[in-house]
Image (spheres, rainbow, N blue to C red):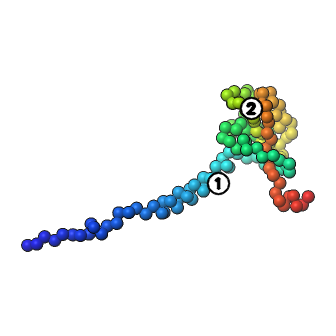
Amino acid sequence: MSITKREEGKKVNSNINVTPMVDVMLVLLIIFMVITPMLNNKVNVELPVASAAVMMDNANKEDAVMVAVTRDGKTFLGANQVNVDDIGSKISALLENKTDKEVYLRADVRANYGKVMDAIDQIRAAGVSELGIITDKPDEDQTVKK
């Protein structure tokens, strides 16, 4: 009677192949990098085009106070719809602890000018020192036509 030993356990490779996991993680990272700037603009408005626009890097920050006026005259503070008369008090509360009193306005190109001016008046009444109006840069096709 003899005892036979099985040697199969020595042949097992227990290394983990992490290459597929790294590939998936890199794809997810790229997707999130592309989507994150789009999340900042919570209200869809068609911005006017300005050829002499100045870059405002502070408008892309998470804590930037953003007011939007849509084509149909609705006013939004961030992603929340507010009444135009309430904008001043809500902006004052948001800017209370900030040193820079900047607010950014995104107004639709087809919005009623009176509604936009009402929003600007309320923003100024809140004690805002700087008001930035967000616009788009013209495409190269538009600059060639002129």
Nearer to us: label 2 or label 1: 2
- In what element is the residue under mark 1? helix
Name of the residue lying farthest toward the left: 1
22 on left or right of 50: left
Q: Which mark is residue 21?
A: none
- In what element is the residue under mark 2? loop
Residue at 83%, 54% in the rendered image? 138
State the CA–CA distance, disc 2 to disc 1. Answer: 29 Å
Amino acid at pointer 1: Val
Q: Which mark is residue 34?
A: 1
Quick check: 47 above or below 2? above
Q: Position of residue 108 (x, y in %)?
A: 80, 45
Name of the residue lying farthest toward the front: 99
Quarter holding residue 11: bottom left
Q: Position of residue 139 (x, y in %)?
A: 82, 57
Asked if residue 86 can be seen in this view, the reply is no
State if disc 1 and disc 2 touch (CB < 8 Å): no
Quarter holding residue 130: top right
Q: Position of residue 53 (x, y in %)?
A: 83, 47
Asked if residue 132 can be seen in this view, the reply is yes
Residue at 10%, 72% in the rendered image? 2
Amino acid at pointer 2: Lys
Between residues 79 and 22, which one lies in front from this camera angle? Answer: 22
